[in-house]
Image (tube, grey):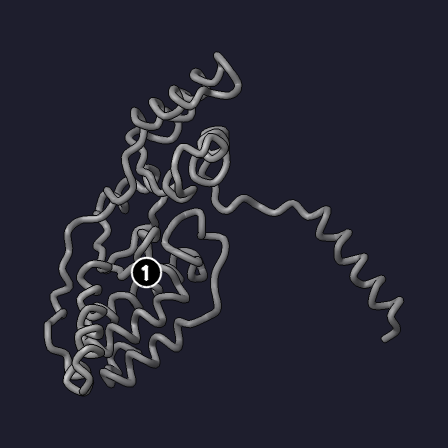
Amino acid sequence: MSLWLVLLCFAVFFIFCENVVLPPPCDSEIYCTGPILDQVQKAKLYDDDKYFVDMKLKDPPGIILFAFKNLSSESPTVPREKLQDFLNKYFEKPGTEFETWNPPDWHSNPAFLNKINDKQLREWAFSVHKLWKLLGKKIRDSVKDHAELYSQIYTPYPVVVPGGRFRELYYWDSYWVINGLLLSEMTDTAKGMIQNFLYLVDRYGCIPNGGRIYYERRSQPPFLTLMVESYYQVTKDKEFLR
């Protein structure tokens, strides 16, 4: 193929892409598009831009959008103080979508720890093993019953989140999480994680990038079959495969 033909192909590609209007990440006029999101993120009210889009609504979206329309009618750009007061009135802090949950299959002495001879490494491995109790989350039924109030996507089984700023499961990350859970002999929790992904496939036709509605129109490399393989290699649970 000549250089000119290659350049022509690139030119056609970029012209085509320039005229393509991509859909928003989701349909929510609060979490994915709309004036509230625009003004909150531009005002930099929070150190982390993810903070706002993980907040729960106190009222249905229509009520909040109408209230903001009235607020912004006074001035197109709402002052920071009034904007913060608005959020305090209509939104809750992130994390209210979870209930307290301790993995019932966690125990303090999985076999892999006894195979580590170095004391310091064994203590470090145990500290990592204890993280499962911290990172394990159970989503409240209210997320299922009132999905319009949350950016969190409901899943029927508890999830293990990556931690840090992330309060939801992630597809690619969960492959490594599941392998860690299996090493820690937490097969029920690992199975539940896989069942959550099967639930998401039934709901969306694919597995979203993560467990928030603003991820629902994008995905990650296909790791579901590898998760199932890891689970089967440890458990030999043929019934689950059926």
Q: Establish if 176 lies above or below 11.
A: below
Instruction: Classify residue 194 by image quadrant.
Output: bottom left
Q: Is residue 136 left or right of residue 78?
A: left
Q: Is residue 38 left or right of residue 16?
A: left
Q: Establish if 144 lies above or below 137.
A: above
> What's the amino acid at mark 1?
Pro
* Residue 102 coordinates in the image, percent (x, y): 13, 60
Instruction: Classify residue 60 by image quadrant.
Output: top left
Q: Is residue 22 left or right of residue 105?
A: right
The residue that mark 1 highlights is: 162
* Residue 155 coordinates in the image, percent (x, y): 29, 55
Identify the residue shown where x is 25% and y is 84%: 234
Quadrant of the drawing holding the C terminus: bottom left
Instruction: Classify residue 231 by image quadrant.
Output: bottom left
Q: Establish if 82 lies above or below 183.
A: above
Quadrant of the drawing holding the N terminus: bottom right
Seen from the viewer's position, the closer of residues 160 and 206 is: 160
Identify the residue shown where x is 11% and y is 72%: 107
Label 1 environment density (alpha carbons within 10 Å; few <14, some 14–19, many ≥20): some
Identify the residue shown where x is 26% and y is 60%: 159
Report the residue that reaches farthest toward the top: 74
Seen from the viewer's position, the closer of residues 5 and 142 is: 5
Seen from the viewer's position, the closer of residues 192 and 43 is: 43
Seen from the viewer's position, the closer of residues 76 and 33 is: 76
Question: Total marks drawn?
Answer: 1
* Residue 144 coordinates in the image, percent (x, y): 27, 46
Q: Establish if 125 lies above or below 54.
A: below
* Residue 8 coordinates in the image, percent (x, y): 85, 62
> For numbered disc 1, what is the local secondary structure?
loop
